Amino acid sequence: MFLMSGHRRHFAGAFGSLRLLAMAGLAGIMMSTGCVEVSSSPIDSPAVDARTDTSSAPSTAADAATSSTPASTPTTTTTTTTSSGDALDLSRVTNFILPATPGVTADKVRSAKVTANIRAASTDGNTLWTSYDHYSFPSGNGVDAVCYFFYEYNGTVMGGKFDWWRTGGQGAKGLENVHGGYGGHKMPARGTNCWTMISSTDGKQRSNTCKVVWK
């Protein structure tokens, strides 16, 4: 019995030594082959593309193309002239372009009662801006005024109606109709003296004429 117990202890000691040697050998193999701890994440998981990552906060910069903030009026490409009374004698206007409203004639508009005042006007050649006092023209079909644009051309003054003002007035009007030759309009040369005016749709009332220089 004593001998068998001794053999068992010797065998267990030898087996334990073998286990230690085996573990040491495995550790050496792992170090020599560069093995590392395997992550619990899949190794083929794709990296996040920064261009499509939605975790970052959205930009607060306004898009210039869609910003609701109105663009500022150009200051280096406009000329503003304050007007007091008529800056243009309407008798000088030839080829007077009129609205297609029954009973409205050039003479009627020329002699219309001045009941509105345009204080100032400016243009960059594409938009006409006006500053005006409150006026009370009759309204109909959503408009209450005819907008006129006159200019010097080949030694004469010509032009006339190029658009309508919506009821309540419009401080800015595009000049596409002047560019497009609406009603016989011509494109003024750069630096040309121009004038603007509004009238009631029936031609009985008008504003003063206000000077502006074409850019």
Image (cartoon, rainbow, N blue to C red):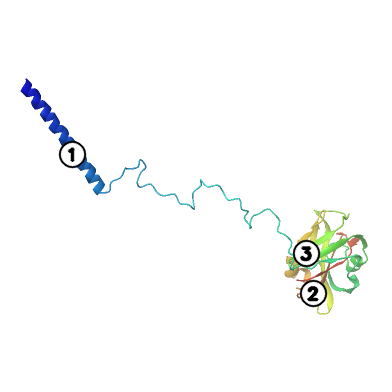
Q: Residue at x 77, y 60 (%)?
A: 172
Element carrying mark 1 = helix
Q: Is residue 47 visible?
A: yes
* Percent x, y of residue 98: 83, 66
> Who is closer to the viewer here, 67 or 16?
16
- Say which residue label 1 marks: 22
- In this image, 55 relative to 69: left or right? left
User: Furthest residue to the bottom?
Assistant: 155
- Say which residue label 2 marks: 192
* Percent x, y of residue 153: 80, 76
Q: Residue at x 17, y 39 (%)?
A: 21
- In this image, 17 relative to 125: left or right? left
- Say which residue label 3 marks: 128
**Residue type highlighted by circle 2:** Thr
**Residue type highlighted by circle 1:** Ala
Q: CA distance from mark 2 to mark 3?
A: 14 Å
Element carrying mark 3 = strand
* Percent x, y of residue 108: 91, 65
Q: Is residue 75 above or below residue 33?
A: below
Q: Is residue 56 above or below residue 121?
A: above
Callout 3 environment at 10 Å: few (<14), some (14 to 19), or many (20+)? Answer: some
Q: Quadrant of residue 114?
A: bottom right
Q: Quadrant of residue 42?
A: top left
